[in-house]
């Protein structure tokens, strides 16, 4: 007889309010292969990244990018905890959810405000960069960020915020800055895309702090915009679970783990319906968790002993919403695959011999189409097959 798995919440939570139960479940984090792999890749990238590096983490909406950000932030904090005890000024990994852009342009002022709040910078709305302040030297670390700025009654300019942010990063010395919903940076006109990324690169370079950007596949519009940025960046892909047997087993395991964290008297057995849950969630655990949270609320409100498939069906996404969700996933995956499709073409052009070259580099040949021409086997002096003139001869021929 198999032993039932242990529930993943404190027993007295069943007697708590519905708000407390929902707060517990929605804050719960489960480990599953996609997040585990991405976490190892991100921590590895941070361990070898240069101070001016950029890291791109992208995948479909609801795949678990925010969960990855939170888990990595906690890992970095735990790793530096002994140092943090003696160095109270250091902030290990500040993070921020980037604001959605306005109708015309991205609001960097609001972004810097959010980041400065995360860095615990004082007098954010009264900063003014001093003309004597030289923040162009990334090796200069001020012992007090207030020494480079003076309070003023006027509203700070964008440059004031940027200078304050760079100086604060030097003072706080984080391992990296983690930016969620970074795909919002791509929602500008095409000519401004490179300027957006150049600004982020400049922030990383001048502060000596790697910046990690997490977002949907829309973030691909910013990736590899220039060779200078590509050479100093890392890519981390968080895919949805596929239809392969191993991925389906992992998805069913994630369903079972979430069921164990549902504070209801009887543990749900939704993993038995993982095929249905997979299809209606796009294979994304984040989408699944939000969906299960809505079903949990209904079950608790009805005093139901457990969460059933009927609760899930009642809260399932509409066909129209699911169509849009799946379309974005498929198109994003195609865009990711097509990103390297021109490599062979560009490589052959790059390796094409120039004037004065003695040796031709090997080029990648495309597969020939159609059957090859037969090789002639005629002997020397033998006529090629041809039609001889017949019928009445022309005058020119008669002469």
Image: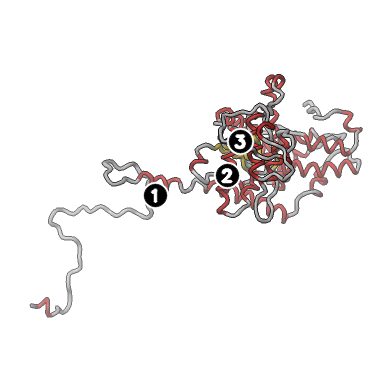
Q: Residue furthest front?
A: 132
Upstream in the sequence, badge 1 or badge 2? 2
Residue beneath label 3, please? 132
Q: Which comes sooner in the sequence, label 3 or label 1?
A: 3
For the residue carrying disc 2, how many other residues have a C-alpha within 10 Å: few (<14), some (14-19), or many (20+)?
Answer: many
Query: What secondary structure is marked by label 3?
Result: loop
The earlier-in-sequence mark between 2 and 3 is: 3
Q: Residue furthest left?
A: 399
**Where residue 197 is drawn, which disc sits there?**
2
Q: Nearer the viewer, mark 1 or mark 2?
A: 2
Indicate the position of residue 239 as horizontal and vertical percent values. Answer: 62, 41
- Name the side, left or right, on which 298 lies relative to 88: right
Q: Position of residue 331 (x, y in %)?
A: 60, 51
249 relative to 282, above or below: above
Q: Is residue 12 left or right of residue 8?
A: right
For label 1, the residue is: 367
Query: Where is the C terminus found, in terms of image quarters?
Result: bottom left
Left or right? Give the position of 367 relative to 2. left
Q: Alpha-carbon neighbours of circle 3 within 10 Å: few (<14), some, or many (≥20)?
A: few
The image quarter containing residue 169 is top right
């Amino acid at each position: 007889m198999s032993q039932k798995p242990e529930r993943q919440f404190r027993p007295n939570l069943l007697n708590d309010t519905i708000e407390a139960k929902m707060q517990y479940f929605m804050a719960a984090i489960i480990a599953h292969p996609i997040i585990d792999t991405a976490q190892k890749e991100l921590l590895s990238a941070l361990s070898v990244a240069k101070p001016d590096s950029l890291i791109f983490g992208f995948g479909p909406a609801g795949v678990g990018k925010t969960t990855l950000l939170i888990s990595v932030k906690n890992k970095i904090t735990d790793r530096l905890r002994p140092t943090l005890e003696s160095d109270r000024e250091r902030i290990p990994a500040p993070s921020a959810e980037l604001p959605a852009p306005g109708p015309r342009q991205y609001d960097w002022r609001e972004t810097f405000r959010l980041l400065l709040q995360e860095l615990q910078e004082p007098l954010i709305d009264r900063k003014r960069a001093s003309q004597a302040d030289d923040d162009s030297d990334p090796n200069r670390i001020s012992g007090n960020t207030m020494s480079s700025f003076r309070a003023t009654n006027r509203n700070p300019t964008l440059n004031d915020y940027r200078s304050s942010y760079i100086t604060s990063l030097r003072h706080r010395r984080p391992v990296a800055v983690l930016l969620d919903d970074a795909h919002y940076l791509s929602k500008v006109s095409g000519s401004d895309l490179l300027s957006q990324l150049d600004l982020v690169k400049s922030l990383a370079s001048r502060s000596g702090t790697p910046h990690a950007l997490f977002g949907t596949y829309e973030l691909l519009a910013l990736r590899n915009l220039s060779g200078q940025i590509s050479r100093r960046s890392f890519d981390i892909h968080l895919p949805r679970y596929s239809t392969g047997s191993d991925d389906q087993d992992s998805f069913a395991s994630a369903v079972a783990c979430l069921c164990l964290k549902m504070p209801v008297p009887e543990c749900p057995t939704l993993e038995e319906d993982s095929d249905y849950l997979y299809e209606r969630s796009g294979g994304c655990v984040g989408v699944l968790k939000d969906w299960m949270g809505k079903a949990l609320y209904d079950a608790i409100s009805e005093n139901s002993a457990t969460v059933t498939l009927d609760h899930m069906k009642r809260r399932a996404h509409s066909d129209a919403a699911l169509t849009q969700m799946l379309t974005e996933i498929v198109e994003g995956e195609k865009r990711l695959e097509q990103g390297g499709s021109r490599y062979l073409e560009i490589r052959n052009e790059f390796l094409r011999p120039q004037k004065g070259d003695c040796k031709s580099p090997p080029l990648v040949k495309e597969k020939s189409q159609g059957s090859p021409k037969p090789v002639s086997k005629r002997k020397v002096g033998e006529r090629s097959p041809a039609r001889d003139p017949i019928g009445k001869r022309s005058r020119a021929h008669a002469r």
